Image (cartoon, rainbow, N blue to C red):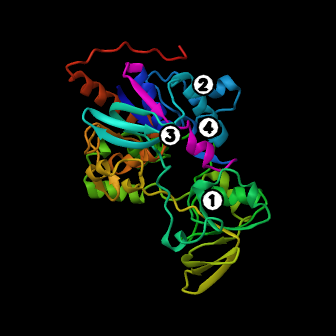
Amino acid sequence: MTDVAIIGAGPYGLSAAAYFRHKGISFRIFGRPMDSWLSHMPKGMVLKSDGFASNIYDPEEAFTLERFCSERGIPYSDATPVSLETFAAYGLAFREQMVPELEDKQVVGLDRSSDGFVLRLDDGETAKAKRVVLAIGITHFQYMPDSLAHLPSELMSHSFRHQNLEGFKARSVVVIGGGASALDLAGLLHESGAEVQLVARRASLKFHSMPTGKPRSLWQQIRHPKSGLGPGLRSRFYANAPGLFYYLPESVRLHVVRTSLGPSGGWFIKEKVVGRVPLLLNCTLLHAEAQGDKVRLHLRTGDGAEREILTQHVIAATGYKVNMERLQFVSTEIRSKVKVLGGSPVLSPQFESSVPGLYFIGVASTNSFGPVMRFAFGAGFAASIVTRAIEKARSKDPAFVPAPRVMSATK
């Protein structure tokens, strides 16, 4: 039996594994490395996060994105957004150097046992662990509005399903949404030769400001400090103090999570959308209906008028909502015992759920630790806290014998 099983191999799972490895905590980690980035985000996309905020974390900071780019001859700047291709390649290289233990297997079942947890893997193996860290990212939490959910898959899909957009060339497509995913898809679909339109409830689109490259005054640095979530005092707090965020009143935390860092696109996507893609803003989708091989969308505009669009495909770039019930690989018994709030697990200051030994890191921990848990920048904090918690729990085990620390593979 291993000390910990990590489920998920994105930035959070890989960071946790690197910390466990360094501390000599025995673990197994399961999942396809960087799956969301490699399989579920469109080619040509650029991350909104700056370079310094796009690291995957190990306790010695031995393999940063900057180091990876330097070794590969890839241009890098702390203030320059990172391409999807570069970030995914970095994640795979991090896995090879820092987490060679990763097993490219899927966990299809998770249940309790008398001394911990039992995991069923897709190859038929059964594994046991005293504790489990769920680092599952957004994979299970795609949100689809009821107004679209009834449409057949050949006519409607979620943005999570699209990595290669070439199949939409010369086809009519409507993208629903006003956030980064919607804007990225609309711009990239246009470049791929699709006849794309963007429909959003927002009256106007928001984009990040383009870096000027000019030195900032001391007052500007104080008033709008740089952070892993963008400039500003609030963003700095959310990015750098998730442990303090945890102790805010519940109503405040939920409000911040719901309203902060709202839908917006990177500055680099603006020129690919504005003036190139037809925009239907301040429009609400009333309902949709399949008509042969097309979809008819019924919209209400901001002035109360109704409008219809006939298209060959609809892509819902409508985001993600954490919901424990979507985790069907987790047993009914465990799901029934995990205390939730608004679908998200209620966590301790150590990321532990109400089921002892079951931890959630990444997007599922956002309601507890704030908006930073939606971004890779939060992975280092989560990994360090969970590592300390597990070290403390192991030290109380009468049979515990400290294992030697493992030096980083890059040393």
Q: Is residue 220 magenta?
A: no
Mark 4 — residue?
Answer: 88
Lower position in the chain sequence, tag 3 or tag 1:
3
Which SS class for mark 2? helix
Quick check: marks 4 and 2 in contact, CB under 8 Å?
A: no
Q: Position of residue 229 (x, y in %)?
A: 48, 45
Q: Position of residue 270 (x, y in %)?
A: 66, 57
The CA distance from mark 4 to mark 3 is 24 Å
Q: CA distance from mark 4 to mark 1?
A: 20 Å
Direction front: furthest residue: 124
Up the image or down, 314 lies above or below 351; here it is below
What's the residue at 60%, 49% (across, down)? Answer: 40
Residue closest to the eye, 401 or 223: 401
Considering the image in quadrants, where does the N terminus appear? top left
Using the rendered image of the protein, determine whether residue 29 is visible from the camera's viewpoint.
yes
Which residue was labeled with disc 1?
183
Tag 3's secondary structure? loop
User: Which residue position holds label 3?
Assistant: 122
